[in-house]
Image (tube, grey):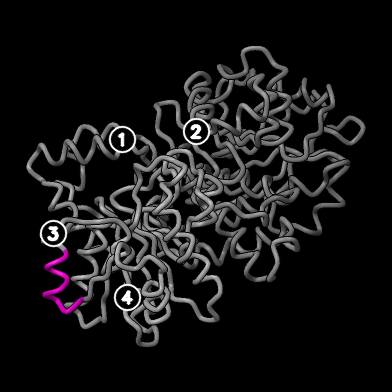
Amino acid sequence: MKLVSVAEMQAIEREADQSGHSYAQMMEHAGRGLAGAVAGRYADLPPGGVLGLVGSGNNGGDTLVALAHLAAQGWKAAAYLVRPRDEGDPLIQRLKEAGGDVFRAAEDPGHETLGNLLHEHGVVLDGVLGTGIRLPLREEVARVLDFAGRTLAAMEEPPRVVAVDCPSGVDSDSGQAAPETIPADLTVTMAAVKQGLLKFPAFALLGDLEVVGIGLPQDGESLESWRRVQRTVPAKQEIHAMLPPRPMEAHKGTFGTALVIGGSLSYTGAVLLAGKAAYRAGAGLVTMGVPASLHAALAGHFPEATWLLLPDWQGAIASRAAEMVQQNLERPTALVIGPGFGLAEETERFLDQLLDEEHLPPAVIDADGLKLLGRLSDWSRRLPQPAVLTPHPGEMSVLTGLSTREIQDDRLNVASRFSREWGHVVVLKGAFTVIAAPDGQQAVIPVATPALARAGTGDVLAGLIGGLLAQGMDAYEAAIAGAWIHAHAGLYAEENLGSAASVLAGDVLAAVPEVLADLP
């Protein structure tokens, strides 16, 4: 799914219209898709029909088309015109001919009719305002939305609310929202995800998010304005298509070897989480390159691994370990470097010397490995091309010199800028993890959950990406798939435990097989 700004979406629609796919045709496709989404989700609701809150713009038009389709399918349908539409509006006439009713806010100054309609219908389509709005809202619209929102909140069993393209009152670029915005159970957005929907506070108002088409010719690929957008929101089907095949005649060598290099006395568990995650991602073999002093503590917890025991210095990886790693690179098809490293100067020298190796396999650099990279000269040119860097905002600050506020305020552009400068894939972790490639491609994972705000979850992510790299995946796709699986494992773990506060990194790791099993 594409991720677009409002201006980009408007340009796409203009070009489509100029190419012969008219706005009326786009509205017809959007309304039919909206009706299909409603019927698909809510057909089993108790009788009560569907009420559309209709504005004067294209969102109102999409809503009227959907109501007409639902009425033709036997739904009881009604439109409440929050803002005036032309008396001869053919979309209103079409709804009436299909058996739907039409009510007008202008004839309902006390909102008594609206209150009754909200109680009489099982689904409400919020089609008052679209993606082009500017805040604050006009007073007459704000009053209606406020009344509807308060009425729904007071109901013991309120109808399901479906936002049309975006919840009315959301700025679809910035993610800001009017206080009168009605929270949705489902948002059906048209053609592409609008970038403001994956920002707060808007995201908290969306409910589930679904995209329906508007009939763009050749799925938009014939339009220059569509092709120019390089941002995507990965969906389940796309992740499934990215993952390597697992043929029945495979052996462990088919799926590669991940060498996970990390660990120190202070951070013993991090490397264990990363190694197990690499296996859960499908790697055929995981070798753990850890300080020799950690072996006894770790080996009993990870019988599936093989071990490369590295010289250590006070429990951290010593500089002379670089030579040992370089002598054992024949088998690994991917490296995971950094989980549990610590920041000892000896480990910094180890990393410096390791990067002198000209033939390193594809690599993921994580955690303290990133902080140590920032101390090294010309590090971006010395890494295998392209490596995958997995910083959280604090680590990104160390690497870039920007403040965490500057990074968080412009996550997409910051990740993309430095991916291009460094020549590596950047996975900027956090709510709505951003993946940026040096060629300008970007992906945003549509998940934000406090279940992942816990030490060790980043190690799981690094291991997942490393396990996918080991199987021969392209660095950018491995980063996208790993981040998507990781984010959804956080959601599954939260659901399994019943509380985000109780989720540990090990719970996220344990949920990975569930996520993979649920892929198409």
- Res. 47 image quadrant: bottom left
N-terminal of the pair, mark 2 or mark 4, is: 4
**Few, some or many residues within 10 Å of mark 1 (<14, 14–19, 20+):** some
Residue at x-position 83% and y-position 47%: 295
Compared with residue 180, is residue 217 higher up or lower down, i.e. above or below?
above
Q: Which residues are magenta?
A: 92-100
Which labelled disc corresponds to residue 8?
Answer: 1
Mark 4 sits on what residue?
50
Label 2 amino acid?
A: Leu
Q: Nearer the viewer, mark 1 or mark 4?
A: 4
Check contact, mark 3 vs mark 1: CB within 8 A: no
Label 1 amino acid?
A: Glu
Check contact, mark 2 vs mark 4: CB within 8 A: no
Q: Nearer the viewer, mark 3 or mark 2?
A: 3
**Few, some or many residues within 10 Å of mark 4 (<14, 14–19, 20+):** many
Label 4 amino acid?
A: Val
Mark 3 sits on what residue?
89
> How many numbered circles does the render carry?
4
Q: CA distance from mark 2 to mark 1?
A: 16 Å
Mark 2 sits on what residue?
412
Compared with residue 265, is residue 297 higher up or lower down, i.e. above or below?
below
Q: CA distance from mark 3 to mark 1?
A: 28 Å
